[in-house]
Amino acid sequence: MRLAGRMRRLGTESAFAVLARARELEAQGRDIIHLEIGEPDFDTPPHIVEAGCRALREGHTHYTPAAGIPELREAIAEEVSRSRGVPVHPSQVVVTPGGKPVMFFAILVLVEPGDEVLLPNPAFPIYESMVNFVGGRPVFVPLRQENGFRFDPEEFGERLGPKTRLVILNSPANPTGGVLTPEDTRALAEILRERPDVYVLSDEIYSRLVYPEASFASIASEPGLGPDGRTIILDGFSKTYAMTGWRLGYGVMPRRLAGEFAKLQVNSSSCANAAAQRAGLAALEGPQEPVEEMVREFGARRDMIVAGLNELPGVECRTPHGAFYAFPRVTGTGRSAGELARLLLEEAGVACLSGDGFGRYGEGHLRFSYANSRENISRALERVAKTLAGAAR
């Protein structure tokens, strides 16, 4: 079969490959503890589920406007205005089937072949995949453990070149759990104000999953960098409201770009799911206690897994300030991250991800998702400790 050459430039997510192998082992009767997949293990809150069911019963089973139903766009505009402290009009909102279309649409709309895109590294692998797909050139800004997995502003500025068209930010971050501080965003904004030709895609899908010792700061809150200018905010419902399977995300952006995004949606998925949009409206307008309870539980799990990882020989783990990932350095074990991830899955029955799946600066690290019960995290730590002790003999 002859495929278009661009398909060779398209990557994937290692999480789904590891999940597939883990399922194979489970089918063989193995007990696998899943710390590889990045989704909350909580159920969608009941009032949101009921809103989705009610929408179906009331006949919301048809196409919606490409950019989303007006009520949801209005609610998103109000939420983003409140949480980021910037004025947002519903016409700047495009509702999408999950958050990934916002990434893809931004890159398709803005990046020509040969244009450069500044990316964090390690980072969500689909950023690089999509840039390569359209013929752009990824330029990596390393995120280092010693700096809390945050950008070094000087390094960031040095990599901003004459061909830079787009900068992608992600805070709180996957896979590191790092969170940009208000000082970080101010420093980045100061650099970017010198380059009015450069757009920003700010992936803020974990914006509500921030722990008490940190605070969420959006580049869109900085003067001159708001969604009325040149920042595209990516957010959604998957992580905050445990709605990964509902496939509901959104972008907030300059009006001119919103029209282009809607055009791409017409040419791809037509619109987001009608009933899911009604459920998303209930999520924003309903009680927020389930989100707060989930964050508190993630915080307790975080403390457990970080403490446990730091007790292991050859492993050192910084405390993440957001999301639900631990990203320990494992170079002291004497094994590569890929080798260790395979060993833990095949021998210990613990599914995790090798850091190099998130870019070359992720080598030497593993990613553990602690979106699993405390009981399973405790069992996983015991298995990892046993495997490392056996490998050292």
Image (tube, rainbow, N blue to C red):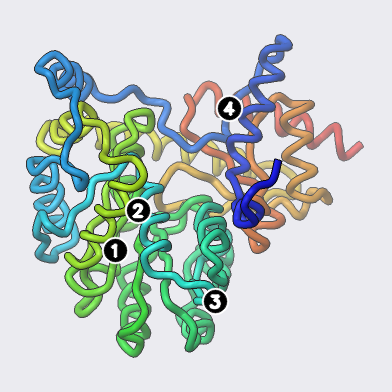
Marks 1 and 2: CB-CB under 8 Å? Answer: yes
x, y percent for residue 216: 29, 58
Is residue 118 depicted above or below 296 in this figure? below
* Amino acid type assigned to the residue bearing label 4 in the image: His
Question: How packed is label 3: few (under 14 Cα within 10 Å), some, or many (20 or more)?
Answer: some
x, y percent for residue 1: 71, 40
User: Quick one: label 4 or label 3, which is nearer the N terminus?
Assistant: 4
Report, in whole angstroms, how far the alpha carbon at label 3 lies from the one at label 1: 21 Å
Report, in whole angstroms, how far the alpha carbon at label 3 lies from the one at label 2: 21 Å
Marks 4 and 2: CB-CB under 8 Å? Answer: no
Is residue 126 depicted above or below 345 in this figure? below
**Mark 3 — residue?**
114
User: Quick one: label 1 or label 2, which is nearer the N terminus?
Assistant: 2
Which numbered circle lies on residue 232?
A: 1
Is residue 276 depicted above or below 362 in this figure? above
Q: Residue at x 86, y 36 (%)?
A: 391
* Amino acid type assigned to the residue bearing label 2 in the image: Val
Question: How packed is label 1: few (under 14 Cα within 10 Å), some, or many (20 or more)?
Answer: many
Q: Nearer the viewer, mark 4 or mark 3?
A: 3
Quadrant hosting residue 21: top right
**Mark 4 — residue?**
34
* Amino acid type assigned to the residue bearing label 1 in the image: Ile
User: Quick one: label 1 or label 4, which is nearer the N terminus?
Assistant: 4
Q: Residue at x 35, y 53 (%)?
A: 102
Report, in whole angstroms, how far the alpha carbon at label 4 lies from the one at label 2: 28 Å
x, y percent for residue 291: 25, 35
**Mark 2 — residue?**
102
| SS state under label 4 | strand
User: Quick one: label 3 or label 2, which is nearer the N terminus?
Assistant: 2
Marks 3 and 1: CB-CB under 8 Å? Answer: no
